[in-house]
Image (tube, rainbow, N blue to C red):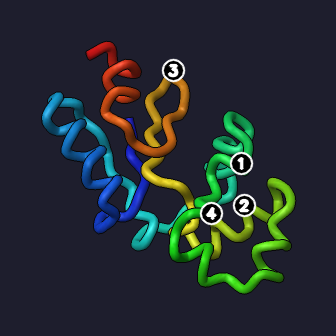
């Protein structure tokens, strides 16, 4: 299983703590250091839609000028922007083979996801 995010994000910290407390082993993928590739993002978009993945509530989105925000109209434009600015991806993203992709963190959703 792999958890994608940014280490200093409070929501990512909560997800990591929850996984650690439940003794679930995972690899952590740091967007800031490792970036993200188009194929991974396309797979996520295919599962959930691009709208779920673009964090329109965060400071990175709010710092974009209105023309740039308005230019995000489809999967291709969203993926290009998320590659350029990975901090725009809603986080964390939890990938567990054979299970639905999880975006964001809520303890009750993780508990349900893992049957805990």
Give the quarter of the image for residue 65: bottom right
Vertical arrangement, residue 46 with respect to residue 10, above or below: above
User: Mark 2 packing: few (<14 Cα in 10 Å), some, or many (20+)?
Assistant: many
Q: Which residue is mark 2?
A: 79
In the image, which is nearer the foreground, mark 3 or mark 4? Answer: 4
SS state under label 1: helix
Q: Which residue is mark 1?
A: 42
Q: Which residue is mark 4?
A: 56
Q: Mark 3 or mark 4: name the one nearer the start of the chain.
A: 4
Give the quarter of the image for residue 111: top left
Q: Mark 2 or mark 1: name the one nearer the start of the chain.
A: 1
In the image, which is nearer the foreground, mark 1 or mark 4? Answer: 4
CA gap between label 3 and label 1 equals 17 Å
Q: Which residue is mark 3?
A: 98
Q: Mark 1 or mark 4: name the one nearer the start of the chain.
A: 1
**How many discs mark residues in the rendered view?**
4
Give the quarter of the image for residue 11: bottom left
User: Mark 1 packing: few (<14 Cα in 10 Å), some, or many (20+)?
Assistant: some
Q: Position of residue 17 (x, y in %)?
A: 19, 45
Q: Mark 4 or mark 2: name the one nearer the start of the chain.
A: 4
**Residue 57 vs residue 83, the one in the foreground:** 57
Q: Are marks 2 and 1 in contact (CB under 8 Å)?
A: yes
Q: Mark 3 or mark 1: name the one nearer the start of the chain.
A: 1
Q: Residue drawn at (56%, 59%), measured in percent from left and top?
A: 89
Q: Position of residue 35 (x, y in %)?
A: 51, 67
């Amino acid at each position: 299983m792999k958890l994608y995010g940014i280490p200093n994000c409070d929501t990512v910290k909560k997800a990591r703590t929850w996984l650690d407390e439940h003794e679930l082993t995972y690899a952590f993928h740091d967007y800031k250091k490792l970036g993200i590739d188009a194929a991974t993002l396309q797979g996520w978009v295919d599962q959930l839609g691009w709208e779920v993945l673009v964090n329109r509530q965060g400071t990175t989105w709010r710092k974009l000028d209105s023309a740039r925000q308005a230019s995000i109209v489809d999967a291709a434009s969203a993926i290009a922007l998320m590659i350029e600015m990975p901090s725009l991806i809603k986080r964390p993203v939890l990938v567990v083979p054979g299970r639905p992709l999880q975006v964001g963190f809520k303890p009750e959703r993780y508990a349900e996801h893992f049957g805990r």
